[in-house]
Image (cartoon, rainbow, N blue to C red):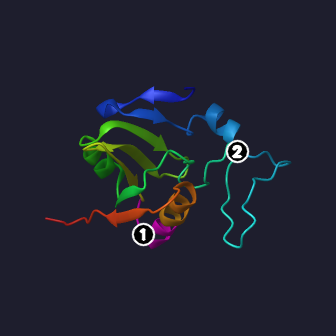
Amino acid sequence: GPGAKRGRLGVTAVSPRDPKERRKTMATPSEKPKYYADTNGMPRTLDGRVTHLGVTEGDVAARILSVGSAGRAHTLAKLLETPTLVDSARGFTTITGGFGGVPVSIIATGMGAPNMDFVVREARAVVDGPMAMCAYPYRSA
């Protein structure tokens, strides 16, 4: 689709970092983003993407592996069948594909617990049904 690019590792990328694409998905000052009615309202762009991850329903699998860096996410993406990449304007990377025929997402959080909070809440907002998430630990040599 528009904005989709073939990137390294054969990953299809949808990048809202392109100013033209970003303009299409962000509210103008006179338009307010839509929020859920509950007390845990989830801000979304005009096209329905959650604010930080830049994903919507169908972009994230119910099984999620969280990593700190986008580099590790791209390395692990080599193990996925037909990986698809969503790079958010806020610096999060989400790669979704199959592993042994099972849909799996890899989400690079950047660093720190506050970013992980965004990942958990926003992934939960776009995944229907049970969701499992684990972190791929980093160990220095």
Residue 100, image x and y in percent?
A: 24, 44
* CA–CA distance in space, label 2 to label 1: 26 Å
For image coordinates 75% across by 53% down, the residue present is: 33
Q: With respect to residue 68, does 25 lie above or below?
A: above
Question: In screen coordinates, is 16 left or right of 11?
Answer: right
Residue located at (86% from left, 48% from top): 30
Point out which mark residue 121 bears. none
Whether pointer 2 and pointer 1 mark residues with C-beta atoms closer than 8 Å, the reply is no
Secondary element type, mark 2 = loop
Locate residue 35: give its quadrant: bottom right
| Kind of residue at badge 2 | Met
Q: 79 left or right of 27?
A: left
Q: Quadrant of the C terminus?
A: bottom left
Q: Earlier in the sequence, mark 2 or mark 1?
A: 2
Residue identified by numbered label 2: 26
Residue 78: x, y in percent? Answer: 25, 40
Type of amino acid at the residue the image marks with label 1: Gly
Question: Circle 1 is placed at which residue position?
Answer: 112
Task: Magenta stretch: give its range.
Answer: 110-117
Point out residue 95 in the picture as x, y percentages from the top left corner: 39, 45
Does the magenta segment cover residue 113?
A: yes
| Near-viewer residue (91 or 121) | 121
Q: Secondary structure at mark 1?
A: loop
Q: Most prominent secondary structure in the magenta stretch?
A: helix
